[in-house]
Image: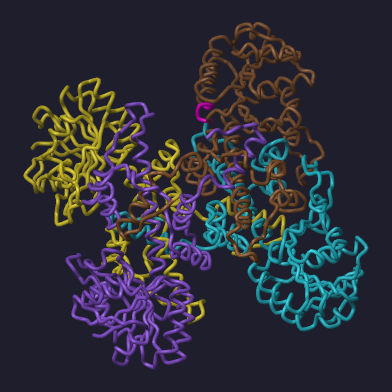
Chain colours: A purple, B yellow, C cyan, D brown
Amino acid sequence: MKIGIVGLGRMGANIARRLMRHGHAPVVHDRNAEATAALAKDGATPAGDVKALLAALPAPRAIWLMLPAGAITGAMIEQMAELLSPGDILIDGGNSHFKETVARGRALAARGIHFIDVGTSGGVWGLERGYCMMIGGNEAAVHHLDPIFAALAPGKGDIEATPQRDGRDPRVEQGYMHCGPSGSGHFAKMVHNGIEYGMMQAYAEGFHILATRNDKALPEAERFNYDVADLAEVWRRGSVVSSWLLDLAAIALAKDGKLAGFTGAVADSGEGRWTVEAAIEQAVPAEVLAAAIFTRFRSRSDNTFAEKLLSALRFEFGGHVEPK
Amino acid sequence: MKIGIVGLGRMGANIARRLMRHGHAPVVHDRNAEATAALAKDGATPAGDVKALLAALPAPRAIWLMLPAGAITGAMIEQMAELLSPGDILIDGGNSHFKETVARGRALAARGIHFIDVGTSGGVWGLERGYCMMIGGNEAAVHHLDPIFAALAPGKGDIEATPQRDGRDPRVEQGYMHCGPSGSGHFAKMVHNGIEYGMMQAYAEGFHILATRNDKALPEAERFNYDVADLAEVWRRGSVVSSWLLDLAAIALAKDGKLAGFTGAVADSGEGRWTVEAAIEQAVPAEVLAAAIFTRFRSRSDNTFAEKLLSALRFEFGGHVEPK
Amino acid sequence: MKIGIVGLGRMGANIARRLMRHGHAPVVHDRNAEATAALAKDGATPAGDVKALLAALPAPRAIWLMLPAGAITGAMIEQMAELLSPGDILIDGGNSHFKETVARGRALAARGIHFIDVGTSGGVWGLERGYCMMIGGNEAAVHHLDPIFAALAPGKGDIEATPQRDGRDPRVEQGYMHCGPSGSGHFAKMVHNGIEYGMMQAYAEGFHILATRNDKALPEAERFNYDVADLAEVWRRGSVVSSWLLDLAAIALAKDGKLAGFTGAVADSGEGRWTVEAAIEQAVPAEVLAAAIFTRFRSRSDNTFAEKLLSALRFEFGGHVEPK
Amino acid sequence: MKIGIVGLGRMGANIARRLMRHGHAPVVHDRNAEATAALAKDGATPAGDVKALLAALPAPRAIWLMLPAGAITGAMIEQMAELLSPGDILIDGGNSHFKETVARGRALAARGIHFIDVGTSGGVWGLERGYCMMIGGNEAAVHHLDPIFAALAPGKGDIEATPQRDGRDPRVEQGYMHCGPSGSGHFAKMVHNGIEYGMMQAYAEGFHILATRNDKALPEAERFNYDVADLAEVWRRGSVVSSWLLDLAAIALAKDGKLAGFTGAVADSGEGRWTVEAAIEQAVPAEVLAAAIFTRFRSRSDNTFAEKLLSALRFEFGGHVEPK
């Protein structure tokens, strides 16, 4: 199937490549000409600009945007809205905020254009493992794109089947799901990332507790000298905490159990924040998800004004002077 | 290998069974005679009491205790201390507090008895999947028990190997690890369970946010009517949050997406609390692990005194009267 | 000074009364005619509608809105925008979101109307104690309103002076502050309320811990049978935790140490949520403020879907069945 | 009244001085002879060692220990136990763990010695303001010491009376309270400090949010350029968040609104940790109190192992490289 792909960063380029591996024919464009050329070399049809890309696609045209969420995605959608025809399908595969997606879906529907939101998980591993996709939008358009989703998805693999799923949507077991109306794909992906933040934080705190048990200041009988790489590895087999994130922790810790190459200043990419905001809007207690992003905020700063005020108060009421 | 097993609850009985499947010969005892008889029927050698059990074992004797942590385990260890001989090996496979284990290890070592702590993860699935084991104590004794651990562990399976592990302890990839001195196995298991609490809470909050998106009070365009069972299922393939706990969530939600059979009053079993206490002792921030146990505390009570005081204060300063 | 007051709920009515006590002449209106009449009886000039109210004021007119934040305040501001003349001053004394205030300030400035935001703290006690006011907007307009603010503020009272404040704005010690541009008053009030939530939660948790120490299930030597009303009272004198909120806790607990009249389902009124959202936007860790609102969310619901999922997972991996 | 005081640090010395101001006659000892001499100069009877101190007191002797909690207090109590006679009263005015106090109370009671625990709040301000005291132990002994407590307490002052306290213990309004049996004073003081941590953290987070609103990177219309010293000051009058801690914040911020002299590495002194541990033991959710100590832990360290693991995981799944 012919499909346009706009945005050839790590995610977009690999999506194009995985589609080609499954016999599809992507027409690709990136504002960076080198990125476009690299994909052309791999067999994709290059397009010098958006108009050329659209011209190379049969009606109804399907275009997958894989751009940074926010202004860049917004500008491209506005540009596309002017160029597309009724019946065309525009896909936002990035991490846009679901409220923007709902609004965009409505605006494009008014022009007869189908707007499909696809929350896409898989990272740099997706090319080989496939992408898990949470899809929102019009049923018929999602159905039309089925060959694309089927190619990108991981497929059933050798993962053990969940009992009592007879009669349920078989696409889900392939690794993609039509979640509901416009925005529901991005919302699901947002929460997915919120959960990811929480899980990462759970491992992080646990390994921190283990690592401090190796502290040379401890009395010898209480110093356990854990090999944390081995702990991550052993938990991969038969334990309750096994997961793909744990597999990755085992990989990282096997390289260097001290993680000396990392500063520990941890970025956050929007969906974690939005998940907590959604929790607040929906009056859902979300302690763990909130704590996970607060830890990241703190990791990126020096001692905060908050902490200085704590020190100042201790000085005022108790005369305490705190050394570093 | 002949090994004594004391305590034939869900965990102990299945450990005995898995050992038999791998050609070992457990001598078993439970204070509940029926439990002992059930195992005997499956091929284990029954023992009417601890003395009989010890008499049936060759020197050096190895006895695996699989009893509720706390007073019951403590009393049995004291009883055993009187009956065992130098060179014998006593194993505590339960979830004892690591500080008690360190103390017991010292006391038994003074009598020449090896005390081995084994943190055992696997739950009701262990019989089939094998148990992940975190082991603390004397090297020689751990080595002596290796056939037992090898039989109980899940083995390498078809889990993808972690790169850059050449030259590392091969037992770890089988699913068991000699962590360090006495207590280090129980400490590692404790933290493992702390992480488990945190991960569970991350999923719980995420699915709660998703489920409230189905609320009939929402305007229709914002109501996503998620099939949460399908979301759990789709994330099992290619997503960053895939894990064994997610597999279990998919199983539970496929049975009933409303989870109507569960009250949601969630027990906690000690290790979660101890993990937070250890974090506090070691000055490790552990927001997520703490939040996970606090959620469980709250889940088991009606509106708390704390909440009533909040209401009372709002009444006092603002005249607010809160309805339920 | 003549000033219009629109909205005669608990706050608006008392503001009008306090102004009259200080010699001002409020022209008042509430859509509930009885509320307007009640104030007229107390000496205020009643106005049957907004136009009548405006007609009764000399130029430049000053109107204080004391309405529920959100749609009601928004609609009134839009109506006023049509009726006011350049140089008039419109005051929003409610808890509007600061972003709305910034936008409204800009829109009204374009018409030559001064928009002043006043975060007003004091609750039902304000009539007697005075109101603490955080003010945002145009300097000249704030200056023009100074007699109003001075009348509403508590004044210096017998509160001990803070050292090293020479040369600073003397209004601050009277209990009102011109914080900065449009929106800065509402933002400051929002954070004030966030802090209030956090402080209330700190007391609530502490008294909960004390109250559970009276639990009849405790062994007698560990049961302290605290009189929590006396604890609140004793802390009012010389302790580090003395505060006005503690004064109120002492009042509430002296009435009934069990707080039996309160369900403990605690409302939250917007500013707490917004404070956490602002923290997230500004990348500030705000654990305590977040925990405070999450507690309120949980206090208003039965066992959550999150908790049911925890129970369901425990059942799946461990066969645990949880009673209520 | 003659009373021995052992430990003449900031707290002990000022307690002695306040007692002298009220006509009592302290016999004082510190292992630092200069500290003892300084008090002697102020009028106290110096004692070169504990025996001399005891010899200078009439029966039944009362001795107030004001020593660092833990080993130093423990050793002194053991020494005293050997030297005291039935009927003597030993007071621990420090921040000992209540469980130790319960045990010590029992051991000393067996020898006929009264052991009184006094949680003492007031810090460096206590000499002038008086000390808030939470007292545990034997009724008769507490009664015997009443002149001491009355002298140390702040007294009623001009603090407004709480309604509906008729018939209640009048000592409470003087600022001291007999809480209950041995340990109940230290437990109450522990929770008091836990609340203090939570309140401090609430202010700290709030002022942090306000201070970041001054960030030069913000667009000008959203930059509020708050004078945080003035905000602290204005909230002292009529606002819901007024408190003694806020008074201190106003003092500290008036000196320097940037708090540039403080590193922000915040110590914690035991009671905060113990409060959370007590909450865990008593199954009380204590999110805010826990978050307050976790913030202090983090404030004292560089980027943690936990944070490095988060970075490492982000690198493994997404190829993200995080700059500082």
Q: Nearer the viewer, residue A164 or D132?
A: D132
Does residue A148 sit above or below B166 in this rendering?
Answer: below
User: Looking at the image, how many numbered discs can be counted on the residues?
Assistant: 0
Q: Which quarter of the picture shows residue B6?
A: top left
- Identified at 40% across, 73% down, the residue is A186
Q: Is C291 a magenta residue?
A: no
The reply to whether residue B263 is in sight is: no
Which image quarter holds the N terminus of chain D? top right
Q: Nearer the viewer, residue D290 or A316?
A: A316
Q: Nearer the viewer, residue C300 or A318?
A: A318
How far from the left and from the top, in percent, is residue C163? 77, 40
In the image, taking residue B240 as reference, residue D269 lies left or right, namely right
Q: Nearer the viewer, residue B193 or D251?
A: D251
How far from the left and from the top, in percent, is residue D213? 62, 58
How far from the left and from the top, in percent, is residue B103? 32, 27
Does residue C67 sit above or below A111 in this rendering?
Answer: above
- Specify the segment rendered in magenta: D98-102
Q: Is D99 a magenta residue?
A: yes
Does residue B60 sit above or below B96 in this rendering?
Answer: above
In the image, taking residue C196 as reference, residue C287 lies left or right, namely left
Q: Which quarter of the picture shows residue A59?
A: bottom left
In the image, taking residue B96 as reference, residue A74 lies left or right, namely right
The reply to whether residue A240 is in sight is: yes
Q: Which quarter of the picture shows residue C34?
A: bottom right
How far from the left and from the top, in percent, is residue D306? 39, 47
- Identified at 43% across, 62% down, the residue is A269
Main SS of residues in magenta = helix
